[in-house]
Amino acid sequence: MALKLRKNQSPPPPNGCPLSHCMEILKGAWTPNVIWHLAAGPRRFSELRLDIPAVSAKVLTARLKELERKGVVNRKVRPTSPPSVEYSLTDLGAELLPAIRAIVEVSHKLKMREQDGRLTAEGAATE
């Protein structure tokens, strides 16, 4: 006997699905970390490398260029000798922070559940 398909009660996503578009911005490796560290204020490339020691220079460069192109990060060349570059969040980039903070909170809760042994290796909650 086949199971009856249930109708999804969620409203359909709006045209152009904003959730998919936003996730497209955040999906790159280290992207949320870059946004997180820029939340405290402008940072130079070398400072971001210290903030995120596991990221390679090549990947960090790619993420910063991508975020700048998407309007999330601002790149400002400082008139110093030698010239230096600072990265900061745009207003749009700052709007992503509550979502990233919420993801961090859920991550902490999941980690605590894992440490308490309440999750199996497959991720299902145990009784």
Image (cartoon, grey):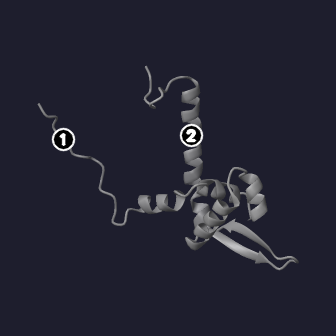
Furthest toward the top, the residue is: 127
30 to the left or right of 88: left
Q: Is residue 117 visible?
A: yes
Front-most of residues 50 and 95: 50
13 to the left or right of 73: left
Labels 1 and 2: the sequence-earlier one:
1
Residue 109, numbered label? none
Around disc 2, counting alpha carbons within 10 Å, would you say few (fewer than 14), some (14 to 19), or many (20 or more)?
Answer: few
Percent position of residue 59, x then y: 63, 60
Q: Quadrant of the C terminus?
A: top left
Furthest toward the left, the residue is: 1
State the CA–CA distance, disc 1 to disc 2.
32 Å
Residue at 55% of width from left, 70% of height from top?
Answer: 70
Residue at 66% of width from left, 71% of height from top?
Answer: 74
Q: Amino acid at mark 2?
A: Ser
Percent position of residue 36, x then y: 65, 54
Helix, strand or loop under label 2: helix
Q: Which residue is mark 2?
A: 107
Q: Total marks drawn?
A: 2
- In the rendered view, would you say 15 is above or below 122? below
33 to the left or right of 27: right
Q: Amino acid at mark 1?
A: Leu
Furthest toward the bottom, the residue is: 79
Q: Which residue is mark 1?
A: 5
